[in-house]
Amino acid sequence: MNDLESWCKKNVENSGQDSEIEPNSALYTEIMYLLNHWEGLTSFLRIEGASLDNNIAERILRLQVINRKNSLFYKTEHGALVGDIICSIIKTSEETKINPFEYLVWVQENAAEVKLNPEKFMPWSFKQK
């Protein structure tokens, strides 16, 4: 990484003279970006156990992104609200380590009781079989 940084700095400082990089090229722009953000882009090398990717964050946000795309096709505002609620229920179920499908079946099987006491039917109240 030190060799890469040295090469980038050398070519940026000598741009136009004996440099391999033209100052108005896309490569020059990318090298400048790399040098300007060097500390952040190489922080994974200095932080022990730092992940090389952001798959964990991507996985967490996946359901919300899919719901946002699906919301373009809801016919009514009420339908969009129902879709958001279901998305929220699924994500909350996953976060509390329960099966969202089994939880929703449980809620449907107890629909009358849910109307009377909805606070007793939160995902964290569900006991998996």
Image (cartoon, rainbow, N blue to C red):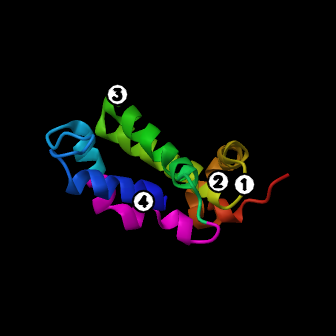
Q: Find disc 4 in the rendering and name its residue.
A: 41
Amino acid tagged 4: Leu
Q: Residue furthest right?
A: 129
Mark 3 and mark 1 in contact? Answer it, CB < 8 Å.
Answer: no
Among numbered discs 4 and 1, the one appearing first in the sequence: 4
Among numbered discs 4 and 2, the one appearing first in the sequence: 4
Magenta segment: does it hold 36? yes
Q: Quadrant of residue 36?
A: bottom left
Q: Find disc 1 in the rendering and name its residue.
A: 98
Q: For mark 3, does the 10 Å Cα neighbourhood hold few (<14), some (14 to 19), or many (20 or more) residues?
A: few
Amino acid tagged 3: Phe
Compute the Cα span from label 3 to label 2: 25 Å
Compute the Cα span from label 4 to label 2: 32 Å
State left or right for residue 121 relative to residue 82. right
Q: Find disc 2 in the rendering and name its residue.
A: 94
Say the numbered circle drawn on residue 73: 3
- Residue 7 drawn at (x, y percent): 37, 53
Mark 2 and mark 1 in contact? Answer it, CB < 8 Å.
Answer: yes
Among numbered discs 3 and 2, the one appearing first in the sequence: 3
Mark 4 and mark 1 in contact? Answer it, CB < 8 Å.
Answer: no
Amino acid tagged 2: Glu
